Image (spheres, grey):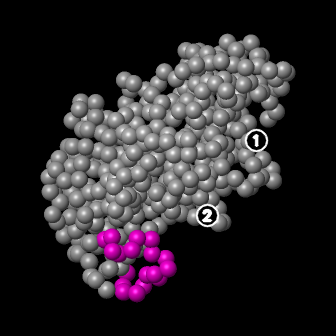
């Protein structure tokens, strides 16, 4: 079974050279720590920066330079700042090649729910709805089940939706799945996780074709 | 050069009255008009509708206005990190309209650009789409979103001149340029009010035509919401 860092590490293997990438808050942010050797990517943050660098050293924080999670950041050579309308033009206009974000639930037709739990304080969707509605390539990073052990990989989402039919790939603590034709296609298993375990943890339609390799980290 | 300089935040916010709609620039606490917010807190204008991506934290930004219950309605994309906000929202004292961030930015831009509405894919199939017209373009469903304007837009820039030309710093730009366009009256507070001709016309982000009043803020606290650092090796 993967921990959060290993989920990020596996997603980082999907990065391709010279891609522009938007990373959501939580596990997705960790993907930046595992960029494969020889791959150059530029990170976009929807509050208005392309070419995000690592966190600053203590004492070098700049209040005017933050990411979408409101954390202090730095920039890389070639970075650029822009306003929020331009930022979402990049996103809606599909100029960003990959979006990685977290989810509370994902369904077999690619629906995603990640912004609201009825009865709990609603904080808002931020940029998530714009991101999922337009991105060509969305990878969801999430735990396969909730704390009670119930599946979050569902036939239909039960929570209010963030977007419909938009998720293409899901990387969980148990496996990598592709969503197509209204089903989850199992691509890889996490080390020491059996197909049986994945089946038991998946409520949505799971397709297992041929030999499913163990992922390499 | 048209001179739009006013003396201070008091003069700049003159005419802001109860029950008006305001736009306030900023993302989190980054690039917010601190001096005007302090003035509105002092003036205690009530019943405001505030359009702003976020609602500040308990003791800074719009949070200061929430403490005095000056805000009737918030139009935002994300409002976490604020206990008083949560309390007022749950008791129904405060109305909240949550909008996808990109739609919020574009609705402000449209408001300033004379475009009454536009179609966007964001929010289709979600509760954001309820009651909105849906139309397919290139085989994909989109929802109709309307433009936003405000009685006053209050923005914060790094540098400005007396004509109201503005340059923002780093990610403190965020919603400020679109909101500057969408205010019936736009107030710009700047860290540095520079002398005539000092700004390079090639580098101006907001043309002064969008700004009606400008002043240099007395002081900027520039509070950081999430100080995040890495270790020196």
Q: Quadrant of residue B99?
A: top left
Drawn side of residue B67 relative to residue B127, left or right: left
Judge whether A169 appears above or below B166 on screen.
above
Q: Nearer the viewer, residue B204 or A173?
A: B204
Residue under label 1, please give it. A13
Residues at marks 1 and 2, CA–CA distance in whole angstroms: 23 Å
Residue A33: image location, x then y, percent: 69, 46
Number of residues whose C-alpha sits closer than 10 Å to that of mark 1, classed few (under 14), some (14–19) or many (20 or more): some
Residue A208: image location, x then y, percent: 76, 19
Identified at 64% across, 24% down, the residue is A182
Magenta region, residue range: B194-211
Q: Quadrant of residue A57?
A: bottom right
Drawn side of residue A61 relative to residue A97, left or right: left
Residue A93: image location, x then y, percent: 56, 53
Q: Nearer the viewer, residue A84 or A110?
A: A110
Residue under label 2, please give it. A79
Judge whether A192 appears above or below B117 on screen.
above
Q: Secondary structure at mark 2?
A: strand
Identified at 14% across, 52% down, the residue is B18
Judge whether B11 appears above or below A74 on screen.
below
Q: Quadrant of the C terminus of chain B?
A: bottom right
Q: Secondary structure at mark 1?
A: loop
Residue A28 visible here? no
Identified at 41% across, 51% down, the residue is B118
Is residue B205 highlighted in magenta?
yes
Magenta stretch: helix, strand or loop mostly:
loop
Identified at 67% across, 27% down, the residue is A181
């Amino acid at each position: 079974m993967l921990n959060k860092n290993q989920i990020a590490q596996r997603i980082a293997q999907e990065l391709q050279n010279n891609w522009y990438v938007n990373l959501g808050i939580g596990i997705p942010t960790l993907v930046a720590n595992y960029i494969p050797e020889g791959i150059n990517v530029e990170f976009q943050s929807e509050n208005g920066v392309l070419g995000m660098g690592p966190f600053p050293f203590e004492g070098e924080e700049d209040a005017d330079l933050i990411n979408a999670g409101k954390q202090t950041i730095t920039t890389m050579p070639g970075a650029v700042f822009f306003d929020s309308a331009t930022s979402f033009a990049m996103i809606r206009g599909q100029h960003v090649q990959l979006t990685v974000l977290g989810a509370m639930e994902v369904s077999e037709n690619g629906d995603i729910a990640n912004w609201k739990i009825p009865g709990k304080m609603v904080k808002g969707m931020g940029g998530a709805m714009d991101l999922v509605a337009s991105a060509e390539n969305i990878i969801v990073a999430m735990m396969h089940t909730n704390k009670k052990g119930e599946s979050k990989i569902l036939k239909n989402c039960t929570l209010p939706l963030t977007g419909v039919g938009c998720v293409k790939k899901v990387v969980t603590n148990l496996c990598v799945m592709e969503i197509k034709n209204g089903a989850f296609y199992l691509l890889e298993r996490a080390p020491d996780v059996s197909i049986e375990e994945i089946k038991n943890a998946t409520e949505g339609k799971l397709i297992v074709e041929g030999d499913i390799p163990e992922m390499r980290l | 050069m048209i001179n739009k300089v006013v003396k201070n935040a008091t003069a700049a916010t003159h005419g802001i009255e109860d029950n008006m709609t305001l736009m306030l620039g900023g993302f989190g606490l980054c690039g917010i008009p601190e001096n005007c917010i302090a003035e509105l807190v002092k003036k205690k204008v009530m019943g405001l509708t505030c359009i702003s991506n976020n609602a500040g934290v308990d003791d800074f930004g719009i949070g200061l206005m929430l403490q005095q219950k000056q805000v009737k309605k918030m139009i935002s994309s994300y409002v976490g990190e604020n206990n008083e906000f949560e309390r007022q929202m749950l008791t129904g004292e405060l109305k909240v309209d949550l909008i996808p961030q990109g739609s919020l930015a574009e609705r402000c831009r449209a408001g300033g650009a004379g475009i009454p509405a536009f179609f966007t894919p964001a929010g289709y199939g979600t509760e954001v789409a309820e009651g909105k017209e849906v139309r397919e373009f290139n085989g994909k469903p989109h929802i109709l979103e309307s433009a936003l304007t405000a009685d006053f837009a209050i923005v914060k820039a790094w540098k400005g001149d007396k004509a109201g030309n503005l340059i923002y710093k780093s990610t403190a730009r965020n919603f400020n340029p679109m909101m500057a366009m969408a205010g019936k009256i736009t107030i710009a507070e700047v860290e540095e009010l520079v002398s005539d001709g000092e700004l390079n016309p090639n580098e101006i982000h907001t043309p002064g035509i969008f700004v009606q009043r400008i002043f240099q803020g007395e002081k900027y606290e520039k509070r950081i919401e999430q100080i995040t650092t890495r270790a020196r090796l």
